[in-house]
Image: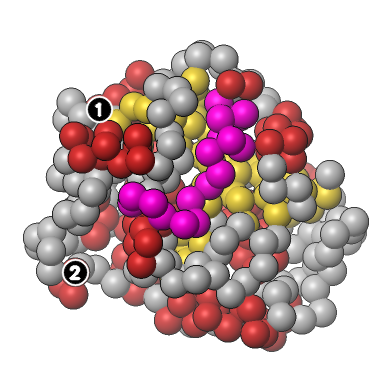
Amino acid sequence: MNGHISRRSFLRNSAIAVGTVAVCDLNGLCRALATEQDRSQVFFTRDIGSDGLLKLYSRIDRGMAGKTAIKVHTGEPHGPNILPRDMVKALQRHIPDSALVETNTLYKGRRFTTADHRETIEINGWNFCPVDIMDEDGAVMIPVKGGRHFREMSVGRHLLRYDSLVVLTHFKGHAMGGFGGSLKNIAIGCADGPIGKKMVHAAPDNDNYGAWLKGEPFQENMVESAKAIADHFGKRIVYINVLRNMSVDCDCAGVNAAPPKARDVGILASTDLLAVEQASIDMVYQLPEEELHDLKERIESRKGLRQLSYMKELNMGNDRYELITL
């Protein structure tokens, strides 16, 4: 599969539904007879709240230990769609020795400098626990194993402080990625502002967005950046996608984000990055046409599905999954 393929046509008769278990691949084929080793577990709840989030985390917490980073998107000031703070607070308090982590932006908004970013953190209510801006003290290179475009990626230096990483993501559209899930949250969100984000975007400067990389080449850059993070943490990284307030715009758009037309779906979690992203896309593509249309157009016009196929090519997870509804 490549980024040109629509998922709507082959998901119409999919077996993915609440209360069922389905094993699916990137061709949308559901294989109920697949063996256990052929599929990854993805856990799902419709409870978009603290209780639902903690239940899901208990199912994917397999060996998370030591100092734990919780990667969230802090958003531009007063963004209407960012994750509910009470829900994030409950998870952070549940995980010993944990902190929220972020990096500064490449674009010149209200999170471009550490000082402005910290003001935005206060405005948006993320000050209930430590928030580590990981590139506050510079960056460090970590390897990209098996990449075609990069051999190393520049990330916030403080990333090296942590033993485990919980990727807690508001799943939504994205101006360049088409959609922003767990992959985007670490690919862009752990790359430092001045170097790593510029590498991923192949950006000649901060403001000329028209010259930034687009389409499948950009998707591939994101995948390789995410691979560096996933490989760095190994088995001590887990992924949670919250399918809520799914505007076509990222939380980087702040108050200018387009109003969501899609209903809230629920929360998905897995230890497998590709599986949780695949399941999220599959659930979104099951929405009625009037709710799906704008998100689908954003995803496919940006070749966003290339994130999935390139992850598969780089052996970053399993596109066949068992959906377990809690």
Q: Position of residue 115 (x, y in %)?
A: 18, 34
Q: Position of residue 295 (x, y in %)?
A: 53, 75
Closer to the camera, 247 or 14? 247
Instruction: Specify the farthest residue to the left.
Output: 205
Q: Is residue 298 left or right of residue 286?
A: left
Residue placed under numbered mark 2 in the picture? 209
Q: Residue at the location (44% across, 72% down)? A: 258
Name which residue type carries label 2. Tyr
Crowding around mark 2 (Cα neighbors within 10 Å: few <14, some 14 to 19, many 20+) is some
* Label at residue 88: none
Q: Residue at the location (67% across, 61% down)? A: 264
Magenta residue span: 76-92
Residue placed under numbered mark 1 in the picture? 157
Q: Residue at the location (23% across, 33% down)? A: 135
Q: Is residue 28 above or below residue 63?
A: below
Q: How many marks?
A: 2
Name which residue type carries label 1. Arg
Label 1 or label 2, whichever lies nearer to me, is: 2
